[in-house]
């Protein structure tokens, strides 16, 4: 099961609802988190000394930091164990994705995921996909529309090459081809 980051705003909303006297189900629903997540944050706040009769002023940055550090797993580099397992195999993954080697074709991330599982490295597919994009250059994003930024406050106009229709000599309309659009 994956780990979803809960923002500080959501933590504050959970604690605010709990301090107002609402139940965990309602608190979780209003904050947009799972009920178990809300329960963990409230329990951590209680362990840090928050009492239900305290006002919302008691929820300061220090308390939120204590709650977050108590509940969230320790991730010094921002990534979990699956990412670390992939870092150990980065060269192999990059080679598979690029198709390096004798008569080797580039492999898809799905196939790389299967090959890693065969080697005993079972990681979530989405983590592998993010790793491949960030560390191995998989489907590197390139600029699709180049825009020359102007001075602040000055109007800019961009032509995206609208294809439109042509009207022939006989009066009938027909779609313009991309080649004709490029010539005009």
Image (tube, rainbow, N blue to C red):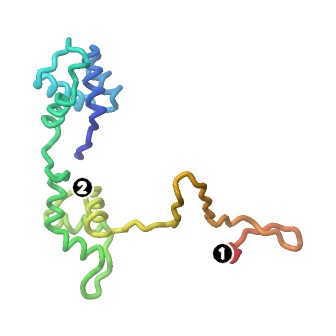
Q: Secondary structure at mark 2?
A: loop
Q: Residue at x 32, y 80 (%)?
A: 105
Q: Which mark is residue 26?
A: none
Which of the two residues, 124 or 142, is positioned nearer the viewer here? 142
Q: Secondary structure at mark 1?
A: helix
Q: Residue at x 28, y 37 (%)?
A: 7
Write down the quadrant of residue 104 in the picture. Answer: bottom left
Q: Which mark is residue 124?
A: 2
Q: Are marks 1 and 2 in contact (CB under 8 Å)?
A: no
Few, some or many C-alpha atoms within 10 Å of disc 2 (few <14, some 14-19, many ≥20)? Answer: few
The residue under label 1 is 182
Q: Earlier in the sequence, mark 1 or mark 2?
A: 2
Q: State which mark lies toward you, 1 or 2.
A: 1
Q: Position of residue 10 (x, y in %)?
A: 30, 32
Q: Position of residue 152 (x, y in %)?
A: 52, 53
Q: Residue at x 75, y 66 (%)?
A: 165
Q: Residue furthest top?
A: 53
Which of the two residues, 77 or 112, is positioned nearer the viewer here? 77
Q: Is residue 78 above or below residue 65?
A: below
Q: Is residue 57 above or below residue 109?
A: above
Few, some or many C-alpha atoms within 10 Å of disc 1 (few <14, some 14-19, many ≥20)? Answer: few
Write down the quadrant of residue 87 in the picture. Answer: bottom left
Q: Residue furthest bottom?
A: 102
């Amino acid at each position: 099961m994956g780990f979803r980051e809960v923002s500080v705003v959501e933590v504050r909303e959970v604690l605010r609802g709990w301090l107002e006297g609402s139940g965990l189900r309602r608190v979780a629903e209003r904050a947009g988190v799972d009920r178990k997540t809300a329960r963990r944050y409230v329990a951590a706040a209680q362990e840090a000394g928050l009492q239900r009769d305290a006002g919302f002023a008691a929820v300061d940055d220090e308390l939120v930091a204590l709650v977050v550090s108590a509940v969230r797993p320790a991730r010094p580099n921002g990534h979990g164990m699956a990412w670390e397992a992939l870092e150990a195999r980065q060269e192999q993954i990059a080679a598979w994705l690029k198709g390096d080697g004798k008569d080797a074709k580039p492999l898809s991330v799905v196939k790389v995921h299967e090959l890693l599982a065969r080697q005993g490295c079972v990681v979530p597919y989405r983590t592998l996909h993010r790793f491949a994009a960030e560390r191995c250059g998989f489907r590197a994003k390139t600029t699709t529309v180049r825009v020359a930024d102007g001075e602040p406050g000055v109007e800019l106009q961009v032509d995206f090459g609208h294809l439109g229709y042509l009207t022939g000599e006989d009066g009938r309309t027909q779609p313009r081809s991309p080649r004709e659009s490029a010539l005009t």
